[in-house]
């Protein structure tokens, strides 16, 4: 059973105020890079694993996806998603990704944004996603980067000249990391990049693209606070093919 | 033209005294993990890119490789390799990996240990390696990990409790890194892990295994100084298939 921190009232309130909650995909700095990995969606059957407010589901529908299934463990997120989506070809359903139950060969695209780092049995989930995809279909996801998750003290060090560095340690020690992000005691699962990629390969996927997200010059010019994201990657974007 | 630091007399002298120079493969902590990625060598045509003293070439011959070609940019390294190898099925030849010229479809295995981080045009080299391999053949290599290469100050921070962390910064800034390892002004080429993997994929390789090397418990028990290698990865081992 995944920890369902999103239904914790204080977490949910804080999450609701984040850029990506208020402004949807446009509020997520990594969205342009993630979108660039996506295939043409017209006519595709899409599943979104950890759909949150359903921003991606609605975008996929706008792009002409044949059907969109949005899955999330949080009732609150699904409620909000349904209220924002109105009548549509999107289906939202409650699902714990640790115990996913979806039919085989049913989807042309599996998408997931910043959900997999909560999953303890990621290998089991990847097996199920592989089975749920048709041959040639893609799994495209973002996840917190292992560099971001690993440290005992995941916070910037600032030297006398004001330069930031990220105190990486504990990298080879895989397992839970407890942080106080928006609420106390949020549990994430650290794996090395090698483990993540090898689990994808072992599940039968071919790695198609790996991007350690960082802002472009234009993005830093527009939002100078993004400059620190060049120092160490916070997010990892992956495209894999069944 | 690759910087040929290995023919710098003070570098060569210092390198000669390292464990991996004195004790060969057994003196390289990552060798057991790298060896585990290798196929059965009996009957294979093998090329070693950056063969140094030829330790791997001799081991490959002992394992029954049909032929072994050891390439290196350093005359001094090749001299030593030839003197250690005696009469054998190994051929050593001088080659700048930036301007590699090897015939197509000639090898069953391309191997490289800690050489690719010196290469500026890695994509060009990977294209040539891909052409030089027969279909189904493997490229198996180690390279300095991007986490290890990226920082402006690539040295441990030690806190009041004696704990080590690695001050990661500058990660997204790809390009040369000048360090003073064994000699002053050694130039390495930093690329993100994403760029490295995407270059392999673009050259036509399928990623088979990615390992961010760290010591096992048994290895740390035997050599306690290896414990720090758990805090951040220093080396990356990759297996890719043509």
Image (cartoon, coloured by chain):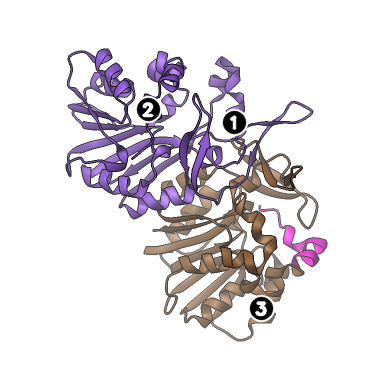
Chain colours: A brown, B purple
Instruction: Name the chain letter of the residue that bears numbered label 2.
Output: B
Q: Chain of mark 3?
A: A
Which mark is drawn over residue A82? 3
- What secondary structure is marked by label 1? helix
Q: Residue at x 61, y 58 (%)?
A: A115
> Which residues, given as a range, are shown in magenta?
A1-15
Q: Position of residue A74 (x, y in %)?
A: 69, 65
Q: Is B77 or B230 nearer to us in this picture? A: B77
Q: Are marks 3 and 2 on the same chain?
A: no
Between marks 3 and 1 in the image, the one whose residue lies nearer the viewer: 1
Q: Residues within 10 Å of mark 2 (few under 14, many from 20)?
A: few
The answer to whether residue A14 shows anywhere in this view is yes
Horizontal side of B39 relative to A225 (left or right) equals left
Mark number for residue B181? none
Q: Position of residue A27 (x, y in %)?
A: 66, 71
Q: Which image quarter: residue B157? A: top right
Q: Which mark is residue B230?
A: 1
The answer for how far apart the CA atoms under marks 1 and 2 are is 20 Å
Q: CA distance from mark 3 to mark 2?
A: 53 Å
Quadrant position of residue B55: top left
Q: Main secondary structure of the magenta part?
A: helix
Q: Is residue A168 shown left or right of residue B48?
A: right
| Residue ID for mark 2 | B35
The reply to whether callout 1 and callout 2 are in contact (CB within 8 Å) is no
**Residue A235 within the magenta-colored segment of the rendering:** no
Relative to A17, say whether B19 is above or below: above
Q: B220 left or right of A226?
A: left
Tags 3 and 1 touching, CB below 8 Å: no
């Amino acid at each position: 059973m995944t920890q369902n921190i999103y239904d914790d009232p204080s977490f949910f309130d804080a999450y609701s105020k984040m850029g990506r909650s208020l402004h949807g995909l446009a509020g997520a700095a990594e969205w342009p890079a993630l979108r660039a990995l996506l295939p043409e969606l017209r006519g595709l059957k899409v599943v979104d694993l950890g759909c949150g407010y359903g921003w991606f589901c609605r975008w996929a529908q706008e792009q002409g996806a044949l059907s969109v299934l949005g899955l999330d463990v949080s009732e609150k997120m699904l409620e909000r998603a349904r209220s924002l989506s109105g009548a549509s070809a999107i289906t939202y359903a409650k699902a714990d990704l640790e115990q996913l139950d979806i039919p085989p060969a049913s989807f042309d695209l599996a998408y997931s944004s910043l959900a997999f780092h909560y999953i303890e049995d990621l290998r089991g989930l990847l097996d199920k996603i592989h089975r749920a995809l048709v041959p040639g279909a893609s799994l495209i996801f973002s996840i917190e980067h292992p560099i971001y998750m690993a440290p005992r003290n995941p916070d910037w060090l600032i030297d006398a000249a004001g330069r930031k560095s990220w105190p990486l340690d504990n990298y080879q020690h895989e397992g839970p990391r407890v942080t106080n992000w928006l609420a106390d005691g949020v549990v994430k699962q650290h794996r090395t990049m090698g483990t993540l990629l090898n689990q994808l390969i072992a599940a039968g996927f071919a790695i198609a693209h790996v991007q350690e997200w960082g802002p472009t010059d234009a993005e830093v010019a527009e939002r100078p606070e993004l400059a620190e994201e060049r120092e160490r990657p916070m997010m990892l974007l992956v495209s894999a093919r069944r």
